[in-house]
Amino acid sequence: MFGTIRKHQTWLWAIIITLTIISFVIFFSPYSKLNDSRRGPANYGSINGERIGEEDFANAWREVQLRAFFMNGRWPEDTDRTDLQGETYKWLLLLQKERQMGISVSSEVAAQTAKAMLSQLQRGGAVAPDVFRKQILLPHNLDLEDFERFVRHYLGIQELIASVGLSGRLITPQQIAALYQREHEEVATEAVFFSASNYLAGVAAPPDAISQFYTNREALYRVPDLVRVKYVKFDLTNYFAEAKQELARMTNLDLQIDEAYRQSPTNFLRELKVASLDQARVKIRDARLREFEALGARKKAAEFANPLFDLEPVAADNLDKMAKTNGQIVGLTAPFDKDNGPKDLEAGADFAQKAFRLKPDQPFAGPIVGQDAVYVIALNQQIPSEVPKLDQIRGRVENDYKYEQAKMLARQAGLMAYPELTNGLAQGKMFASLCLSKQLKPLSLPPFSLSTRELPEAEERASLNQLKQTAFSTPPGVVSNFQPTSDGGFILYVKAKLPLDQARMNATLPAFANYVRQSRQSEAFNEWFSKQASVGLQNTPLGQQRSAPSLASEAKSKKS
């Protein structure tokens, strides 16, 4: 196959984009990972009565690793969110279905796709197969044969997805047009918000009420387990110059971006959350630049961490010693919990997760890639959970009590306003004048549709989904029922449904139709695969793991 690869110069970035979009939405999350310490079980089980051989399992295991690498740019062992064993069994099931359907991939198509995959790794040109083998495959116990087999199977599975999901693409132009209208038809609305902040001034806080409020909500004031860590920080910006050079070597990045945009403009911009191709280029180049910065910082952090982890005896203070030797500054976080992480660093969720795994005999973690830097950390202090006494947090409890009382007052005001507004509209009065007569402040919202992604004028007071649901379930000329929110609530007046922009519809309908068909194809495939997996994988360790909770629930039900 690699002889064929060298003959092809066509960049098939669009193929890779398509493969990424139509990818095992339910079962193959792109964020699934595995620690490399895990290995396949001794008994591999069977799929639909076919015994799984050791070589078949090992090959599938390697292919799933390659898939993760090309989908995410890193190997599964780089994170802990993983079940590589489970994904391997699902991959084997897909390969079995591929064989049963007689799907085969030509050498030429496989070679072209392999060329496109290697182009993702290029620096001013495609990576040569021998370089790819030595620098990327061999360090992970893989070889070119694994890559070639993976490409063929990957393409075969995409054909399987297309075949099985074909029913999802069978939608008429009339149905597409109706869906487009439903998604893009806008409504003109006015809203009255009843916010707790408007009623706070009228709320008192008697000591007895505060004490009772604290007692009733004591569990909510529990402080979770906290941890404090020392860290050495490798700022990404220190590697900007090297990253810029690496980016400059990607001579055909713009060509790849343009080709992906040409294949599906609407979907491409939608995925990137930008409005134009120029903005897409900037966003992608910035992302790649940041990736190169992170690679440089991670390399330096690894050079620091490797000898640190080897120091004997193992002790958290070794971080200070190593930092002093290397001229690095050691920082100390404030105590933080697992869900929120340190407030004084933009370290990312992985920082907190790994910090809470530290133990006195295993005090180090890293390199950890954060938002602005790469970190090597050491355990400093573990603080167990506790419930503070009322006197320690009285001010906070009083504020919470007042806010809850103010929210109740806001909701009472909204419930009382609804019949008055409804009756006034029935008498032919204008919504705005009705609000003013009741000392309410109506807010005219920009037109929005079910496809609207943001509505900053109102989203601080109510969720966009709640506003959409309310607007499109309320007839024009009518006010909605009072809708409670976390801050109080709102009443929405739907003035009118606005006519569609036909010119815009005609221009964007083809891309919208493609998006709908792809989505429905994925849904159809995932529904089919879910049924196949529930039967085909039941005699594998994965199927047995899934059935165990069901059996436990059944036993518990019989006992009760």
Image: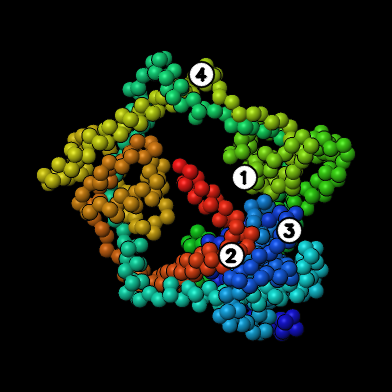
Residue hosting label 3? 39
Q: Callout 2: helix, strand or loop? A: loop
Whole-Å distance between the Cαs marked 4 and 1?
31 Å
Residue 381, position as x, y percentages in the image:
71, 30
Q: Earlier in the sequence, mark 4 or mark 1?
A: 1
Label 3 is placed on what type of residue? Answer: Arg
| Residue position marked by numbered label 1 in the rendering | 349
The answer, for residue 399, to whether it is visible in the render is no
Residue that protrudes farthest toward the top in the picture: 207
Give the residue type at disc 2: Leu
Say the numbered circle drawn on residue 484.
none
- Between marks 2 and 1, how big is the CA–CA gap? 33 Å
Task: Describe residue 379's horizontal placement relative to residue 262 as left or right.
Answer: right
Q: Find numbered disc 4 in the image and state the secondary structure of the residue it sits on.
A: helix
The location of residue 151, given as percent across then percent down, is: 66, 75
Q: Real-space Cα distance between discs 2 and 4?
A: 54 Å
State the separation of the CA atoms marked 4 and 3. 51 Å
Disc on res. 390: 4
Q: Quadrant of the N terminus?
A: bottom right
The answer to which quarter of the image holds residue 296 is bottom right
Q: Is residue 265 above or below residue 449?
A: below
Mark 4 or mark 3, which is nearer to you? Answer: 3
Which residue sits at x=81%, y=68%? 134
Residue that numbered label 2 is attached to: 537
What is the basis of the colouring in this image? rainbow
**Disc number lying in front (2 or 3):** 2
Q: Estimate the x, y position of residue 468 in percent, counting from the top left.
A: 34, 52
Q: Earlier in the sequence, mark 2 or mark 3?
A: 3
